């Protein structure tokens, strides 16, 4: 079962790479900007979750 999951992940990665290679440079730039925005949002959510889980620890920083 794990082997099948790994194979699916590899295939999904291969397809994403093929799709990425079809983009022009402007589209790649937009994709990178959106990716960075999502990463920033996830970092904020993680920070907020940590602050609510460890209020004293986060206040010291």
Image: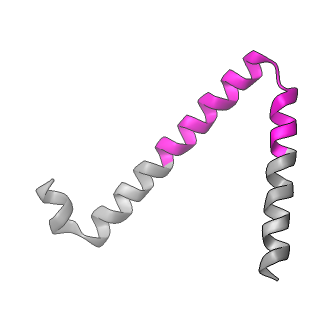
Q: Nearer the viewer, residue 38 or 12?
A: 12
Q: Residue at x 30, y 72 (%)?
A: 53
Judged from this view, the residue extending furthest toward the left is 60
- The relative height of residue 30 versus residue 58 in the rendered view (above or below) is above
Q: Residue at x 44, y 55 (%)?
A: 45
Residue 3 in picture, x, y percent from top left: 81, 76
Examine the image and state in which quarter residue 27 appears.
Answer: top right
Q: Residue at x 72, y 25 (%)?
A: 28
Examine the image and state in which quarter residue 35 appears.
Answer: top right
38 drawn magenta:
yes
- The relative height of residue 5 versus residue 14 in the rendered view (above or below) is below
Examine the image and state in which quarter residue 5 appears.
Answer: bottom right
Picture quarter with the N terminus: bottom right
Judged from this view, the residue extending furthest toward the bottom is 1
Q: Is residue 33 left or right of residue 6?
A: left
Q: Residue at x 38, y 64 (%)?
A: 49
Query: Magenta residues: mostly which secondary structure?
Result: helix
- The relative height of residue 43 versus residue 22 in the rendered view (above or below) is below
Q: Is residue 27 left or right of residue 8?
A: left
Q: Which residues are magenta?
A: 16-41
Residue 32 in picture, x, y percent from top left: 63, 30
Judged from this view, the residue extending furthest toward the front is 3
Q: Nearer the viewer, residue 50 or 25?
A: 25
Residue 29 in picture, x, y percent from top left: 67, 22
Residue 47 in picture, x, y percent from top left: 35, 56
Question: Total of numbered circles in the picture?
Answer: 0
Indicate the colouring scheme. one colour
């Amino acid at each position: 079962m794990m082997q099948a999951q790994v194979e699916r992940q590899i295939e999904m990665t291969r397809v994403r790479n093929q799709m990425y290679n079809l983009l022009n440079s402007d589209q790649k730039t937009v994709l990178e900007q959106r990716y960075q925005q999502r990463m920033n949002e996830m970092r904020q959510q993680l920070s907020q979750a940590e602050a609510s889980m460890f209020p004293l620890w986060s206040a010291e920083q």
